[in-house]
Image (cartoon, helix red, strand yellow):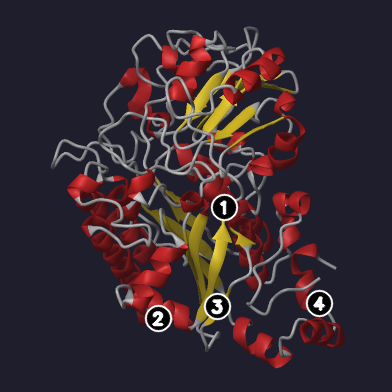
C-alpha cells in the first residue's frame, strides 16, 4: 500500500475501534474532516495564548473568534525549546525541533562549513551563518537594501560552503535545513498540488523549500528590512509601517485564493499555503514609553499592541471573506498560530544590562576581547560582506544565549565561569532565578543534538525571564529563548466541519502542526523525517488521532 495514502486504507472496524477508545464518534470524525482539500497556515508572530483569550473575550478580534467557534483552541501550546523565527517556523512546517531540523537561529554557527570565499574548501572550517536580510543580493558588499525582493537573487557572500562527496558545494538556506518540509511532502504525494509561502526575508527563508530546494512553488520574495522609497526607512520602524509590509502578504494570499500566484499571474489554488505577519511583533517590541508592549502582568495590551491585534484580525477577515467569495471556505483548514511569543510582557521584569554574556566570555579569554569573531569581524563592518573570520566560535544573544566554543576543550572552564557569575550585577549574566538555566553536556545533547557534530551550540544560557542581552533603547521585548512569554503561543485550528468550538487544555507543541497538516490531507505524517525521528504526534481534539 502507498505509504502516502495508507491512512485512508484502514478498515472501518479498526477505525471505529480506535475512535471509540479515543472517545470520538466515528461518524462525527468522518463528517468533520473528510472534506478538507487544502490548509492555510498563518503565523502572527508574537501571538501569545493570553492574547487570543483576551481579545476573544473582549470581542476585540471578531474574525478570530468566528474561526474559533468552528475550531479547536489550544490553551497550552508551546514552542520546542527555542523561539527564534527559524526554529519557530521549522516546528510548524517540519514537525521537528532544532535537534532534527538543525535550525537554531537565523544567525548561527556550523563547525563543518567553510567560508563563502573558500571555493575549494581547503581552508579552516567553522562559519558564522547569517541568513537574514543580507542573504539577498542587495546586501552584497554591505550595499543598501533598496529592493522589496532583496535584489532578485542570493548574495554569494552569504552562502557558505561544505564538502559533499568530495566536492566543495555552496550551502544555500535550503541546503542548511536538515529535514524535509510539509511543502515537499505535499508536492511529492498529491498529484497536481501547488504550494506557497510568504515571509519576512526574501532570501533567508529559502529553507522552507526543504533540502530538495523545490518545495514551495510560489515563495513570495518580500524583505521587511528593505528601504521603502516612500519613507526612506525599512518596514520595522513603527508598527503602522509594518502593516504596509504585511499587506503585501495579505494580497499574496488573496491572489492565491483567486487562482493566481503571489504576483498576480495565473496559477492554481495552493493545497498548502500561508504567510507570516510582523505587525504585532513590532508593536510588542516598541518601548512602553511610546505605547508599545503591555500594561501589566495580565497581558493587558498597550495602545500599539491593541491596534496591531486589530490589524491582524482584520487581515484574517479579509482572507476568510475571499475564501467564501471563491467557494473555498468550507474545504479549507485554517491554522492560526505564531512562530514565537515575545518577552517580557510584564514590563517590571525587564532587565537590559547590555550583552553581559558576550562581555564575560570575552573578558575571560574564551572569545577575542575586541569581538573579532565570525561575522562581527568583517572588513566593512556589515554582515555578509564576504570577509568574516573563520573558526572563531560564536555567541548569539537576545533573551537567550547560544554559545559555540572555538575550543571545545574549554567547556568545563566556561561553564564554571558562567556559574560563578549568575547574578545580575556586573559582570553577571542575570541567570540566577528559578526559571534560568545553563544547559550543556548530555542534557543539551538529548534535547538539541550533539555539539560535536558541528551545528548544535555547546552551551545554551536561559537567563531570568525578562532579561534581554542588549542596551538598546528602541525595544523593550525580544524573543528567541525559552522564557514563558516566548514559548506559550496562541493556536487555533479551524474548519467549518467542526461545528462547535472546542478547547484543548492539555500541553501540545507547535511541532504537532506539521503532522496535522498532512493527516487532514490524508497523508502519512511519517513522510516528514522529523516526525519519524522525534515521534511527533498530530494535534489532539480534531478527531484524527490514530495509532
Q: Disc 4 versus disc 3: distance between alpha carbons?
A: 30 Å
Give the position of the C terminus as an image quadrant.
bottom right
Q: Disc 1 versus disc 3: distance between alpha carbons?
A: 19 Å
Q: Is residue 545 among the parts visible in the rendering?
A: yes
Residue in front for this viewpoint, 215 or 232:
232
Dot placed on the residue nearer the N-terminal end, 1 or 3: 1
Residue occupied by mark 4: 9
| Crowd rating for badge 1 (residues with CA inside 10 Å; few <14, some 14–19, many 20+) | many
Residue in front for this viewpoint, 398 or 248:
398
Residue occupied by mark 3: 503
Q: Tell me: residue 258, above or below residue 96.
A: below
Instruction: Provide residue 38's location: percent of width, then percent of height.
Output: 54, 70
| Crowd rating for badge 4 (residues with CA inside 10 Å; few <14, some 14–19, many 20+) | few
Task: Classify mark 4: helix, strand or loop.
Answer: helix
Dot placed on the residue nearer the N-terminal end, 1 or 2: 2
Residue occupied by mark 1: 79
Which residue is located at x 55 percent, y 84 percent? 498
Instruction: Provide residue 480's location: percent of width, then percent of height.
Output: 49, 41
Residue occupied by mark 2: 66
Residue in front for this viewpoint, 235 or 187:
235
Q: Disc 2 versus disc 3: distance between alpha carbons?
A: 14 Å
Task: Classify mark 2: helix, strand or loop.
Answer: helix
Q: Nearer the viewer, mark 2 or mark 3?
A: 3
Amino acid at each position: 500500500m502507498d505509504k502516502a495514502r495508507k491512512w485512508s486504507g484502514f478498515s472501518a472496524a479498526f477505525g471505529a475501534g480506535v475512535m471509540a477508545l479515543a472517545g470520538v464518534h466515528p461518524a462525527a470524525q468522518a463528517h468533520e474532516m473528510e472534506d478538507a482539500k487544502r490548509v492555510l497556515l498563518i503565523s502572527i508572530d508574537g501571538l501569545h495564548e493570553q492574547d487570543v483569550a483576551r481579545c476573544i473575550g473582549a470581542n476585540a478580534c471578531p474574525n478570530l473568534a468566528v474561526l474559533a467557534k468552528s475550531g479547536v483552541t489550544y490553551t497550552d501550546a508551546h514552542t520546542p525549546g527555542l523561539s527564534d523565527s527559524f526554529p519557530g517556523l521549522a516546528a510548524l512546517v517540519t514537525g521537528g525541533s532544532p535537534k532534527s531540523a538543525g535550525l537554531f537561529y537565523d544567525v548561527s554557527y556550523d563547525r563543518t562549513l567553510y567560508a563563502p570565499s573558500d571555493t575549494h574548501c581547503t581552508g579552516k572550517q567553522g562559519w558564522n551563518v547569517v541568513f537574514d536580510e543580507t542573504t539577498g543580493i542587495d546586501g552584497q558588499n554591505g550595499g543598501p537594501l533598496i529592493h522589496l525582493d532583496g535584489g532578485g537573487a542570493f548574495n554569494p557572500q552569504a552562502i557558505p560552503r561544505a564538502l559533499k562527496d568530495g566536492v566543495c558545494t555552496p550551502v544555500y538556506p535550503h541546503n542548511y535545513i536538515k529535514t524535509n518540509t510539509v511543502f515537499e511532502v505535499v508536492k511529492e504525494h498529491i498529484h497536481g498540488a501547488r504550494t506557497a509561502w510568504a515571509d519576512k526575508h526574501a532570501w533567508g527563508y529559502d529553507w522552507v523549500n526543504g533540502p530538495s530546494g523545490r518545495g514551495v512553488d510560489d515563495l513570495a520574495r518580500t524583505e521587511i528590512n528593505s528601504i521603502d522609497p516612500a519613507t526612506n526607512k525599512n518596514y520595522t520602524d513603527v508598527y503602522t509601517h509594518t502593516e504596509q509590509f504585511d499587506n503585501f502578504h495579505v494580497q499574496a494570499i488573496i491572489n492565491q485564493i483567486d487562482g493566481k500566484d503571489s504576483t498576480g499571474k495565473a496559477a492554481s489554488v495552493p493545497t498548502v499555503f500561508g504567510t507570516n505577519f510582523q505587525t504585532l511583533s513590532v508593536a510588542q517590541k516598541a518601548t512602553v514609553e511610546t505605547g508599545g508592549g503591555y500594561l501589566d502582568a495580565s497581558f493587558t495590551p498597550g495602545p500599539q499592541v491593541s491596534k496591531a491585534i486589530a490589524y491582524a484580525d482584520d487581515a484574517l477577515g479579509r482572507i476568510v471573506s475571499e475564501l467564501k467569495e471563491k467557494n473555498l471556505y468550507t474545504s479549507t483548514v485554517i491554522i492560526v498560530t505564531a512562530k514565537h511569543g515575545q518577552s517580557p510582557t510584564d514590563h517590571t521584569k525587564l532587565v537590559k544590562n547590555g550583552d553581559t554574556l558576550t562581555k564575560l566570555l570575552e573578558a575571560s579569554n574564551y572569545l577575542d576581547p575586541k569581538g573579532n569573531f565570525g561575522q562581527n569581524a568583517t572588513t566593512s563592518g556589515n554582515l555578509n560582506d564576504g570577509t568574516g573570520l573563520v573558526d572563531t566560535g560564536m555567541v548569539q544573544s537576545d533573551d537567550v544565549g547560544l554559545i559555540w566554543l572555538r575550543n571545545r576543550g574549554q567547556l568545563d572552564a566556561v561553564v564554571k565561569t558562567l556559574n560563578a557569575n549568575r547574578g545580575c550585577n556586573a559582570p553577571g549574566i542575570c541567570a540566577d532565578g528559578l526559571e534560568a538555566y545553563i544547559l550543556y553536556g548530555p542534557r543539551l545533547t538529548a534535547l538539541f543534538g550533539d555539539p560535536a557534530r558541528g551545528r548544535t551550540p555547546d552551551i545554551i544560557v536561559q537567563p531570568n525571564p525578562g532579561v534581554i542581552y542588549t542596551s538598546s533603547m528602541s525595544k523593550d521585548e525580544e524573543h528567541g529563548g525559552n522564557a514563558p512569554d516566548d514559548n506559550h503561543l496562541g493556536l487555533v485550528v479551524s474548519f467549518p466541519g467542526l461545528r462547535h468550538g472546542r478547547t484543548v487544555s492539555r500541553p501540545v507543541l507547535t511541532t504537532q502542526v506539521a503532522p496535522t497538516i498532512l493527516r487532514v490531507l490524508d497523508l502519512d505524517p511519517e513522510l516528514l523525517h522529523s516526525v519519524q525521528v522525534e515521534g511527533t504526534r498530530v494535534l489532539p481534539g480534531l478527531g484524527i488521532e490514530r495509532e
